[in-house]
Image (tube, rainbow, N blue to C red):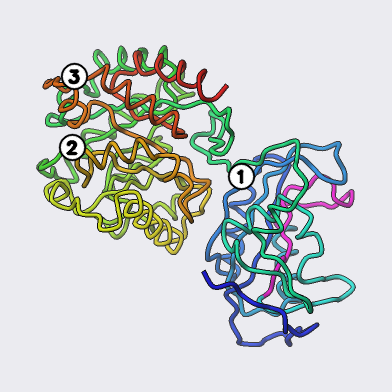
């Protein structure tokens, strides 16, 4: 990656208000430690967009201890890249207006705040005014600024008269902190966010609930009939399931496509039924669909997460719909569609590089559609456009995939449950009997750093996850 070089940047180049020049390399810091911090930061991004400041990309969000004034609640911090034709001083006025509109009242310098927006970088420019300094003077000493900057521009350097190290190097050279910062990914208002970088994180389980007749393993088992649905939900709750994954369209190899109306009829009554029963409020619901219209209807009915096996490739309206809804999305790696994917298993540079590179491209498309980085989860797509050897390599080298350039920090979902390659290895032909083989794959995923395990056998795999966590995440 080429590094932006600023060594010859002018000392101060504040342009006149009303200039039509558009800048795309403007970076703003976002922070909040009052109320619903994530919602406040998202509201700030939306307010910027509504006010003509286009948010191009966002970093992950990090929960951090307060600096300077320590007697206050923890902050959520992030960075966004924006496009604007405002001068630095006009931009400052605009973001201060946004802060005020969102209820910020400054009582104590560096004290509690509902929202805080600071200009970190404005292209090559260096500005030194009484009320505005660009680059922001605190960048090089603040991990909660450097780390999100490294999500976006790790190899860039500060505008300076003298050579400067990259943001990546500045971050590496900071004194060791007592707290380990981790990206935070919201999944449901009733559940804590996923902290993907914490070595002691607890693995979450996602219960597969296919409301279909032809799914490879559990077709015809689940329905919206309360007589069958309630026992399934109670078993999931007892097993400690965090997420219920509701699907109405089979994505097994060569599966026939059902109509949108049929898919809606399968999933919406189920979601509404779950949400009508308060005892299940602390389980998030994901909608397993590649159709934007189904996803939108499911979120309206009470789902929290969109799980798209195609990462937005099978319906061009999916990613813009996710951005509009502001919900968390799981982008899975797949090539082609369920009818063609088994023929698309050639990875000239290896499956790890292929999956990493192609997911990196899907993340970029999602960001271009307006999806915030802190709302994205990834899935390597075990069994989708991969053969047996490739599935095993992904599980064996999963930690490397998590650290793939451009993908680090995202939470990962792994769904190897009862897959055909497990049956071939174990000799177990019936998918429902592949419990022990699935347990081996689950252990590998936990060791590699998976955040969520998508499983059929919730009681058994819940126990496997607890033991695996005790071994590798103590």
Predominant secondary structure in magenta? loop
> What is the magenta range?
101-122
Q: Could you say which is closer to the camera, residue 33 or residue 137?
A: 137
Label 1 or label 2, whichever lies nearer to me, is: 2
Q: Is residue 147 above or below residue 452?
A: below
**Residue at the disc numbered 1:** 38
Label 3 or label 2, whichever lies nearer to me, is: 3
x and y percent of residue 54 in the render?
55, 69
Please state if 47 lies on the left or on the right of 345 as rendered: right
x and y percent of residue 42 in the render?
58, 52
Dot 1 and dot 3 residues touching (CB under 8 Å):
no
Is the residue marked by circle 1 packed among few (<14), some (14-19), or many (20+) residues within 10 Å?
Answer: many
Is the residue marked by circle 2 packed among few (<14), some (14-19), or many (20+) residues within 10 Å?
Answer: many
Residue 8 sits inside the magenta stretch: no
Please tell me whether mark 3 sits on a helix, a strand or a loop. Answer: helix
Question: Residue 454 falls in which quadrant of the image?
Answer: top left
Residue 250 numbered mark, or none: 2
Residue 107 sits inside the magenta stretch: yes
Please tell me whether mark 2 sits on a helix, a strand or a loop. Answer: loop
Q: Residue at x 25, y 58 (%)?
A: 348
C-alpha gap between disc 1 and disc 3? 40 Å
Q: Could you say which is closer to the camera, residue 319 or residue 422?
A: 422
Residue 432 numbered mark, or none: 3
């Amino acid at each position: 990656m080429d590094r932006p070089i600023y060594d010859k940047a002018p000392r101060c180049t504040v342009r006149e208000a009303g200039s039509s020049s558009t800048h795309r390399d403007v970076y703003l810091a976002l922070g909040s430690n009052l109320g619903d911090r994530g919602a406040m930061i998202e509201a700030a991004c939306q307010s910027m967009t509504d006010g003509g400041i286009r948010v191009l990309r966002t970093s992950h969000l990090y929960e951090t201890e307060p600096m300077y004034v320590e007697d206050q609640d923890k902050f959520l911090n992030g960075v966004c890249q924006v496009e604007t034709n405002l001068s630095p001083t006009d931009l400052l006025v605009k973001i201060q207006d946004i802060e005020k509109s969102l209820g910020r009242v400054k009582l104590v310098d560096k004290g509690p705040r509902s929202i805080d927006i600071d200009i970190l970088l404005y292209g090559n420019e260096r500005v030194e005014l009484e009320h505005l300094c660009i680059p922001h003077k605190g960048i090089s000493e603040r991990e909660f600024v450097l780390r999100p900057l490294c999500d976006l521009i790790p190899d860039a350097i500060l505008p300076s008269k003298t050579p400067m190290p990259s943001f990546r190097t500045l971050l590496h050279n900071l004194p060791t902190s007592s707290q380990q910062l981790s990206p935070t990914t919201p999944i449901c208002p009733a559940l804590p966010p996923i902290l993907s970088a914490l070595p002691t994180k607890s693995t979450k389980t996602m219960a597969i609930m296919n409301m279909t007749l032809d799914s490879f393993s559990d077709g015809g088992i689940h329905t919206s009939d309360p007589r069958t649905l309630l026992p399934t939900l109670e078993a999931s709750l007892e097993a400690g399931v965090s997420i219920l994954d509701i699907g109405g369209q089979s994505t097994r190899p060569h599966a026939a496509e059902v109509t949108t109306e049929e898919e809606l009829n399968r999933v919406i009554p189920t979601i509404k039924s779950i949400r009508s029963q308060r005892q299940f409020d602390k389980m998030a619901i994901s909608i397993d669909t590649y159709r934007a219209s189904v996803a939108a209807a499911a979120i309206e009915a009470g789902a929290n997460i969109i799980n798209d096996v195609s990462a937005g490739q099978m319906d061009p309206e999916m990613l813009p719909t996710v951005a509009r809804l502001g919900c968390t999305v799981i982008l899975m790696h797949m090539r082609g569609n369920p009818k063609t994917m088994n023929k698309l298993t050639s990875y000239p540079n290896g499956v790890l590089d292929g999956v990493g590179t192609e997911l990196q491209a899907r993340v970029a498309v999602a960001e271009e559609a307006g999806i915030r980085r802190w709302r994205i989860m990834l899935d390597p797509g075990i069994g989708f456009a991969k053969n047996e050897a490739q599935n095993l390599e992904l599980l064996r080298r999963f930690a490397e995939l998590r650290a793939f350039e451009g993908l680090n920090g995202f939470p990962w979902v792994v769904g190897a449950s009862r897959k055909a390659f497990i049956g071939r290895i174990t000799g177990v032909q019936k998918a429902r009997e592949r419990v022990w083989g699935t347990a081996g794959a689950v252990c590998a995923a936990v060791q590699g750093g998976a955040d969520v395990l998508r499983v059929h056998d919730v009681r058994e795999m819940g126990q496997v996850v607890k033991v695996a966590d005790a071994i590798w995440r103590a």
